[in-house]
Every structure is written in structure tokens, then in C-alpha cells.
């Protein structure tokens, strides 16, 4: 005697209206040829809520050559985080299953970097953050002040002025 497979589809709000861990249950009852009933049950969860998250970068102003770090953080109250992916200029730069996820790099002066993060939970729901922008500036000029008349002495202060353009 073979045991048939049974497939039960749970539709949106049809068979389980309660979202959360272990709030839904399916019971299958089978009767054999002798009238003996056997049942099996399965408790499961429904998660229709998207995860949440943020993405940011440091430092806030970048002059070349400087490294920058993009950090994405996410959370999910129901099924848990599956993956956080940081996208930089149209390419998935890095991903991870634990929050936060970071990506560090440097780009040449004059580069504009656009980034965002996609946060996915274990139920397949996703959240896409807003897009951030980093402008890597180019050092246009730098000037250093001069020493007072008679020369520089210990404790004197010199001014340094740097001008960047993007």
C-alpha cells in the first residue's frame, strides 16, 4: 500500500486570517478502508508585513582619496530577516543575513555614488530603502599659511585651507 502525498494551499485571508508565529493550523484527517480515522496537524505562520530598514554612509563629506562606508540595517518582527543587500551604482555590492551589513570602498575624485539597500524577510517580503548619494570631491587647491615675522616657533599656529570641487 502506498501513501499518497497531500498538498494543501493556504490562500490570502481565506484559511488563516491571523498574522504571527504559530497562529494558523491545518488538520488532515484520513479514513482507511476499515473506517479507522488518522489525523495529522501542522501549525504554521503567516507574514504579510514587509521588513523595515535604513541605509546611510560615512563620512558625510568625502574628499579624494578617502574611503567611505555604507551601512544598511534591517529588522523584521514576524518571520525574521533573510538577507540585506547593498546596491552601489546599479550593482549588488554585498549582502548578509545579519544586521547591520556594511560595504567599504573608495572611488576616484569626481565620482558620484548612488546606493540603496534591499531588505528581505524569511517569508519573501521585501523593503527597498530610499537612494543615497555620495559625491567624491576633487582637491582643487590647498594653501598653508606663513610663519609670523621672525620665523615659526613652537606653539605657533598655521592655517591650512583646502578647496574641493565635485
Image (cartoon, rainbow, N blue to C red):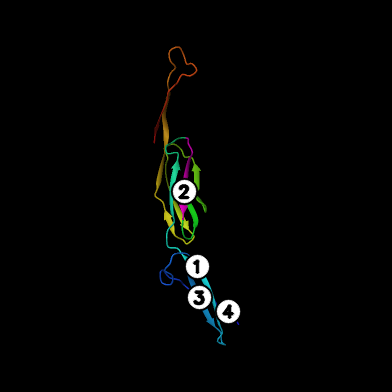
Tell me the tag on residue 67.
none
Q: Earlier in the sequence, mark 2 or mark 4?
A: 4
Residue at left 47%, top 58%?
A: 121
Distance Cα–Cα, label 2 vs label 3: 41 Å
Mark 2 = which residue?
72
In front of the other: label 1 or label 2? 1
Q: Marks 2 and 3: CB-CB under 8 Å?
A: no
Residue behind mark 4? 3
Under circle 1, the secondary element is: strand
**Distance from Cα at disc 2 to Cα at disc 4:** 48 Å
The Cα atoms of the two marked residues, 4 and 3, are separated by: 17 Å
Residue beneath the point at 42% across and 34% down: 138
Residue 103 drawn at (x, y percent): 50, 45
Kindly tell me whether residue 89 is visible in this rendering. Answer: no
Q: Is residue 53 magenta?
A: no
Q: In the rendered structure, which segment of residues is drawn in magenta?
A: 65-75
Please say whether residue 24 is visible from this viewpoint.
yes
> How many C-alpha atoms fall within 10 Å of the one at disc 2: few (<14), some, or many (≥20)?
many
Disc 2 is placed on an element classified as strand
Amino acid at each position: 500500500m502506498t501513501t499518497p502525498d497531500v498538498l494543501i494551499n493556504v490562500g490570502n485571508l481565506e484559511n488563516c486570517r491571523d498574522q504571527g508565529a504559530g497562529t494558523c493550523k491545518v488538520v488532515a484527517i484520513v479514513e482507511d478502508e476499515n473506517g479507522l480515522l488518522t489525523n495529522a496537524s501542522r501549525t504554521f505562520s503567516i507574514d504579510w508585513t514587509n521588513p523595515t530598514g535604513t541605509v546611510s554612509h560615512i563620512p558625510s563629506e568625502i574628499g579624494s582619496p578617502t574611503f567611505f562606508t555604507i551601512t544598511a540595517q534591517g529588522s523584521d518582527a514576524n518571520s525574521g530577516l533573510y538577507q540585506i543587500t547593498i546596491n552601489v551604482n546599479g550593482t549588488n555590492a554585498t549582502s548578509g543575513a545579519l544586521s547591520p551589513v556594511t560595504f567599504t570602498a573608495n572611488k576616484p575624485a569626481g565620482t558620484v555614488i548612488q546606493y540603496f539597500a534591499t531588505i528581505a524577510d524569511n517569508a519573501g517580503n521585501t523593503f527597498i530603502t530610499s537612494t543615497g548619494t555620495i559625491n567624491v570631491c576633487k582637491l582643487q587647491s590647498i594653501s598653508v599659511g606663513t610663519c609670523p615675522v621672525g620665523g615659526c616657533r613652537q606653539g605657533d599656529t598655521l592655517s591650512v585651507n583646502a578647496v574641493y570641487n565635485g
